[in-house]
Image (cartoon, grey):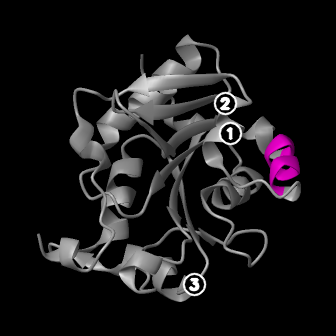
Amino acid sequence: MTVERSKITGVVLAGGRARRMGGADKGLMRYHGHPLVSYSLDALRQVSETILINANRNLEEYACFGYPVITDLNDSFDGPLAGLLSAMRSAQTQYVLTVPCDCPCIDGLLLGRLYDNLLAEQAEICTATDGERLHPVFLMADCRLADDLAAYLASGQRKMETWLRSRRLALADYSDCPELFVNINTREELIL
């Protein structure tokens, strides 16, 4: 199946507190000479015509990458679902595709599996699995779910997997390339 790039807004989720990184803004940390966020942006360019960066600090630095920067709708640092909701509210496309800012092995061509599985299974959401566990921040979602997600967050819920499983969920199998999900969580991992 061919990814319809015009129907997808790609979103890098870089709005976390990065506690394990000592509070440093993970997306702006350098890995092999490049900011971590740049790997995600490169991948999204392969599957989407429109790209956003979801960040809650260092907004001017993120804006230097040349894409619109959107913040969560509140300043509570409510996790990836808050970033997803902000993306859904900002997108002018049918779908949003989210990826984290800290996975330098990300491959844009492989992200197309999320779209293919979403359509093939007539699902509302598709997330990635490596065969052993879900990687829910790698996510394709129908923007019409924004109100449902807003209600879930307003109820005080934050667990991503619980919300995903409450919808028509498809899983994209990435067991052939689990390295895609290797993420950087500590300063030590930046120099590996």
Task: Kindly state the secondary structure of the residue where label 1 is placed.
Answer: helix
Residue at the far left in the pictured view: 192
How far apart, in angstroms, are the residues tagged by discs 3 and 1? 27 Å
On residue 57, which mark appears? 3
Give amino acid for label 3: Arg
- Work out whether residue 126 or residue 19 is closer to the camera in this orientation and state it: 19
Q: Which image quarter: residue 175?
A: top left
> Which residues make up the magenta segment?
147-153
Tell me if mark 2 has few (under 14), some (14-19) or many (20+) residues whose alpha carbon lies within 10 angstroms of its own. few
Instruction: Assign the C terminus to one quadrant of the image.
Output: bottom left
Give amino acid for label 1: Thr
Q: Can residue 142 be seen from the camera position used here?
A: no
Tell me if mark 1 has few (under 14), some (14-19) or many (20+) residues whose alpha carbon lies within 10 angstroms of its own. few
- Work out whether residue 101 or residue 65 is closer to the camera in this orientation and state it: 101
Indicate whether 132 appears above or below 90.
above
Q: Per the image, is 29 magenta?
A: no
On residue 42, which mark appears? none
On residue 162, which mark appears? 1
Between disc 2 and disc 3, the foreground one is 2
Indicate whether 159 appears above or below 47.
below
